[in-house]
Amino acid sequence: MYRRNRVRKVCWFDQNSIEPDYKDQRMMESFITERGKIVPRRLSGVCAKHQKQLAVAVKRARYLALVPFVAENLK
Amino acid sequence: MKRPYETVAIYDATLPDDTIQSEIGKLEEFLKKNTEFEQTVVMGKKYLAYPIRKKKTGIFCQYLYNGEGDVAGKVEKHLKLNEAVLRHLSVVRSPNAAKPVKALSEPAPAAAEKERA
């Protein structure tokens, strides 16, 4: 059985040594899907610690209307 | 024990500029009196992802200050009574939080095309 050599993903926050910031709209938008859902770790490659912080940051950004809760009416 | 706090307030963009400046100044005065005030960062006018009180744009403003535990309650009360504030959020700043976001004058660009598996 052949093994697919999967490239090991590195946590983007560790790589850039920054923390999730709910005020940075562009950062938040890069970690939610078009529908506004938070991208799961298996796709984004973020480590557990930063994924927890990211989830809190996205929820704060949603409350401040920086990112949508549900993006039905895409601009 | 003093802790670093951060409050982000969204002001109603339809109000005249001088009203908004006076509102920002009022909160700054309040913070200087009651807390160890650090900085105000006006993040600029942005489109809201969804309308708040039927308003589609807002002026985001960020206040950085240090204070005791009860200071957050005082700030909340002050902001809640203010008609010009559409929404506000106060959080404890994490020690290695990112530097204040630069003022974004232009509206947010369309979300970049994302390739989602």
Image (tube, coloured by chain):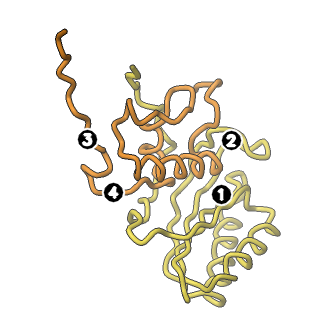
Chain colours: A orange, B yellow
In this view, the mark in front (1 or 3): 3
Q: Are marks 1 and 3 on the same chain?
A: no
Position of residue B48 measured from the top left corner of the image (x, y, whole percent): 63, 43
In this view, the mark in front (2 or 4): 4
Q: Give the amino acid at mark 2.
A: Lys
- Asked where in the image residue B24 lies, by quadrant, the reply is bottom right
- Tell me the quarter of the image containing the C terminus of chain B: top left
**Whole-Å distance between the Cαs marked 4 and 1?**
25 Å
Q: Is residue B59 left or right of residue B110?
A: right
Return the disc, 3 or 4, that comes first in the chain's sequence: 3
**Whole-Å distance between the Cαs marked 2 and 1?**
11 Å
Q: Which residue corresponds to mark 4?
A: A18
- The disc placed on residue B10 is 1
Q: Are marks 4 and 1 on the same chain?
A: no
Position of residue A65 measured from the top left corner of the image (x, y, whole percent): 63, 45
Q: Is residue B20 above or below residue A41?
A: below
Q: How many C-alpha atoms fall within 10 Å of the one at disc 4: few (<14), some, or many (≥20)?
A: some
Q: Nearer the viewer, residue A21 or B108?
A: A21
Position of residue A47 measured from the top left corner of the image (x, y, whole percent): 35, 46
Q: Is residue B41 above or below residue B32?
A: above
Number of on-image labels:
4
